[in-house]
Amino acid sequence: MEKKVSKIGVLTSGGDSPGMNAAIRAVVRTGNYHGLEVFGIMRGYQGLLEDDIFRMENRSVANIIQRGGTILKTARCKEFRTPEGRDRAYQVLKGRGIDGLVIIGGDGSFRGAVEFSAEYDIPCIGLAGTIDKDIAGTDFTIGFDTAVNTAVEAIDKIRDTADAHDRLFIIEVMGRDAGYIALHSGIACGAENILIPEQKTDIEAVVQSLQEKERRKKLVNLIVVAEGDEFGGANEVAKVIKERLPNIETRVAILGHIQRGGAPTCLDRLIASRMGYHAVESLIHGRHNVFVGITNNRMNYIPLEQVHKKKGKISPEWMKIVKILAS
Ligand code: F6P
């Protein structure tokens, strides 16, 4: 028989992402609706180890659905990766009578939850909060849509300058292991080339395509590079291009952390609300130690131990589209 939960904790862990607040709000309000006691845990697993925990009522999450960042703050916690750290976390939760956890974060945060839920009788539910969209088993992650729209807005502005000066801009977007932000924003902004970690960068092909465009007097060019591209990011790509094509005026723009902040888009608020609601429903109905994703517009529950980083899965057709549309 599954254990009934009565007191649940919610935390955000790893890099923040826009929409985390909407997810916290959904967890708190759904929990309270079902008569559970809901506790906010500050700074992810770090706050859990330090017993930095407080009771959350419906009013605690008023006026946050539209805010980026996370009211619970976030951290990356090395100690939770050790058996001693997890034991301390368990003692803290036991002491407070908390018998269920909702973890909003990326794959690193879930790895901690996998070990913890295997060792102790505290069910854990994972919600994918990451701008990288690099978790298998869900079509959406909380924050990706906002991040990619932020990137699109910034790249459109850069295009104005590229156009005014007939320049090549090499724009670096976030994505250490995943190229989704680069791919989506690059296509949406009409980039000539998109360089992503999932694909080996053929710098010679990039140079040749620019040479060919130079011959055709197509002088406004945008190249979007994911920070984790194996060639080494926008500055490295620029070095080669400046050397090989000195006549092309080239600039680098690194978008950086602006992609992590800001008001979440409607889509991010929506999926965060839906996932937060289903996280609590899962705890109540004994669907424990799962990650809640959305696939083909249906909720998808994957055992936490099967959750993994989505790697190398970008279809070659996308690259064909980039090439054809940039001609
Ligand atoms: O995982 C989200 C992410 O923004 C990555 O795209 C990026 O590589 C990383 O976090 C940056 O982390 P930090 O804020 O710790 O530098």
Image (tube, rainbow, N blue to C red):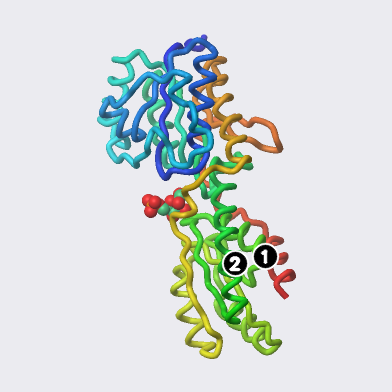
Of marks 2 and 1, the one in the foreground: 2
- Three-letter code for the amino acid on which mark 2 is drawn: Ile
> Which tag, 2 or 1, sits closer to the chain's start?
2
For residue 88, side relative to residue 300 (left or right): left
Answer yes or no: is residue 304 visible: no
For residue 258, side relative to residue 139 (left or right): left
Return the x and y of residue 181 as percentages of the image width and height: 56, 56
Q: Nearer the viewer, residue 319 or 154?
A: 154
* Residue at image location 55% in from the left, 71% down from the top: 201
Return the x and y of residue 209 as percentages of the image width and height: 64, 80
* Residue at image location 52% in from the left, 20% down from the top: 29
In the picture of the structure, the residue carrying the numbered disc 1 is 319
What's the distance in space between the residues labelled 2 and 1, CA to CA?
A: 8 Å
SS of the residue at dot 2?
A: strand
**Label 2 with label 1: CB-CB less than 8 Å:** yes
Q: Nearer the viewer, residue 68 or 137?
A: 68
Return the x and y of residue 319 as percentages of the image width and height: 67, 65
Q: How many marks?
A: 2
Above or below, 254 relative to 165: above
* Residue at image location 66% in from the left, 60% down from the top: 188
In the picture of the structure, the residue carrying the numbered disc 2 is 194
- Three-letter code for the amino acid on which mark 1 is drawn: Met
